Amino acid sequence: QVQLVESGGGSVQTGGSLRLSCAASGLTYGSRCMAWFRQAPGKEREGVAASSAGGGNTVYTDSVKGRFTSSQDGAKNTVYLQMNSLKPEDTAMYYCAARLSVYCSIRSVDYRYWGQGTQVTVSS
């Protein structure tokens, strides 16, 4: 049974940093892509970043390029989203997702497994 559990959300001021973690169980490290999505109130879910095991295939949405970094730790079976230079428009519920493929995308329809989410709030 696949389980994804996010943590690390919180409240920060503009320009601050947060690191989100997603602990995965029931997945093999080498045959998956892990992604991060976010959804703000009244808006559609948006793909933020995705990375394959080993980082060979990584993709980001344009609005976070240069600020966010997605990575995986195989030993801990955990995926991270390092978020720097945060802006108020980054405020959202952030979700971790997984697919059993090394091909990474940031389309929500490509992902079968989802976590419950962790809230990120950036104040100006």
Image (cartoon, rainbow, N blue to C red):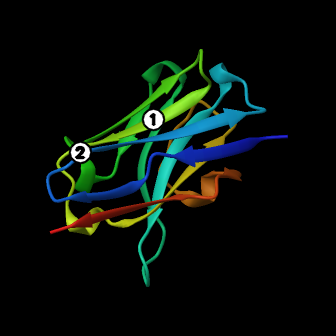
Compared with residue 70, is residue 83 higher up or lower down, i.e. above or below?
below
Which residue is the extreme one toward the right? 1
Which structural element holds mark 1?
Answer: strand
Q: Residues within 10 Å of mark 2 (few under 14, many from 20)?
A: few
Q: Residue at x 23, y 45 (%)?
A: 65
Find the distance from the CA under tag 2 to the CA under tag 1: 15 Å
| Amino acid type, residue under disc 1 in the picture | Tyr
Residue 113 percent across, percent down from the top left = 70, 50
- Quadrant containing the N terminus in the rendered view: top right
* Disc sitting over residue 80 in the figure: 1
User: Residue at 14% of width from left, 69% of height from top?
Assistant: 124
Give the residue drawn at x 72%, y 24%.
28
The image quarter in which residue 63 lies? bottom left
- Placement of 16 over or under 123, stated as above or below: above
Q: Which residue is mark 2?
A: 65
Residue 46: give its label: none
